Amino acid sequence: MPIQKHDRRYDVLVLGATGYTGRLTVQQICERLPTTLKWAVAGRSESKLRGVVDDCRQVHPDRLLPAVETANLNDELQLRSLVKKTKVLITTVGPYSLYGEPVFKACAETGTHYLDVTGEFPWVLRMIEKYETAAKTSGAIMLPQIGIESAPADLCTWLMAKSIREELGCGTGEVSMCIQNLKSSPSGGTLATALSIFDVFSLKELAAAAKPYASSPIPHPEPARPRSSLASFLFGVRHVPHLGLVTTSVAGSTDASTVERTWGLLSETESRRGEFYGPRFVWAEYFRTRNLLSGVAVHWALAVGATLLALTPPFRWLIEKFVFRPGEGPELEDAKNELIEYRGVATPDTQPASQKRVICRAHYEGSMYYMTGMFLAQAALTLLEDDVALGGGIYTPACLGQGFVDRCNAAGFKTDVRLVDH
């Protein structure tokens, strides 16, 4: 499929191309996007960027090599000039709560389509509040959280709701997602984000961003989340049919912010109203646990760890001494043996209650950061090739629709959705 014509110098620009996730994104572009793609890599160090280009030349000599652009995120005029050169900008420069706003603002105001891989949902909510109007005016399609956080959960939910709508002719009720299997190590950027977010946002701001449907453009009627027993609230462990014994997910709040925004966007966006999940949709994410004891341990480790990070700055400083630095991560050879698997179950919203369920399995073999680079590359290609029928605004991964799902499936994020009896 050809790239749609536009008046920008580049089709895609990767900002932060010398960092850990940035390099993997460049690798994905080299391997999977058209060899005639007009693109550029950008960052602070021209010499390091030249090294990225040399790597592309050695491994993929048949493709058009990226141009090199240096960027100073503190120079607003230079930054605006840079983002106006490209149709789609990918930024992997984080933590976004520290460095992301100038890039987000420049793209929203110049009509440049924008992709990032933040998991900092309070920051995303702040960007929505500050720049949604500018993006709608300029025509910029903005897609934050389109990496490991939170594309997999969002796409799986969209696929299950689509199956219920098409096969059963009704809306979707309760959805449970689960990280079923995870073999991976966090990068320095991910760890830096977890440590820095408490320095940027007050506890009041964090609590407000974590409220159900805080990022949705429309309110959700009660109940907004699946009901939970007192024991599940205290100990985290529960049994979910088709998923097994599960506990609290470290990505639960982050992914919920995106999925719940999708719910609202599908209702409000004219071209997507036929995909709306329904008024009684509720969603939660869990993590598969081997047994009761390990599930309780995970739940309390997350609760205690978050409390210490939030209230004890010396604890954050201590952790920083023992983790990867930003731009670093697991060795790529080791990362090839990593994997991640998601499973989900969705209930149709019918009266009387249906005995049917839709279940989903999605998996990716390899580094979750390489998967993140894949999501970025395929989202960029979707924006370049497809008529996505979206005006300017701040969207979610699922809003890119079936074309994006199909590209991700071909690139290694395999999804299987089927209807089963209860």
Image (cartoon, rainbow, N blue to C red):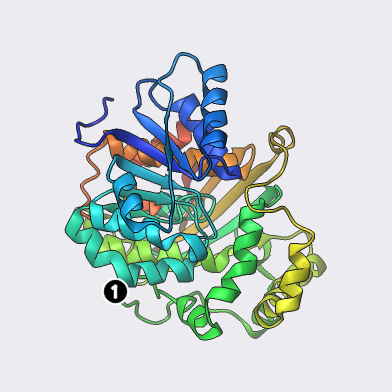
Are there few (<14), some (14-19), or many (20+) residues within 10 Å of tag 1?
Answer: some
Can the viewer see residue 69 in this picture?
A: yes
Query: What residue is rendered at 62% in x and 56% in y?
Result: 190
> Residue 199, how many percent across, how many down?
59, 75
Return the residue at label 1: 218
Q: Is residue 177 left or right of residue 331?
A: left
Q: Is residue 240 left or right of residue 378?
A: right
Quadrant hosting residue 161? bottom left
Query: What residue is rendered at 40% in x and 49% in y?
Result: 115
Can the viewer see residue 414 in this picture?
A: no
In front of the other: 276 or 151:
151
Quadrant hosting residue 407? top left
In front of the other: 417 or 258:
258
> Residue 396, how many percent across, how many down?
37, 56
Query: What residue is rendered at 35% in x and 51% in y?
Result: 79
Q: Is residue 406 above or below residue 289?
A: above
In front of the other: 119 or 389:
119
In the orientation shown, which residue stands out farthest toward the right?
293
Q: Is residue 107 above or below residue 234?
A: above
Residue type indicated by callout 1: Ile
> Residue 400, how many percent across, how many down?
33, 47
Give the secondary structure at mark 1: loop
In front of the other: 351 or 161:
161
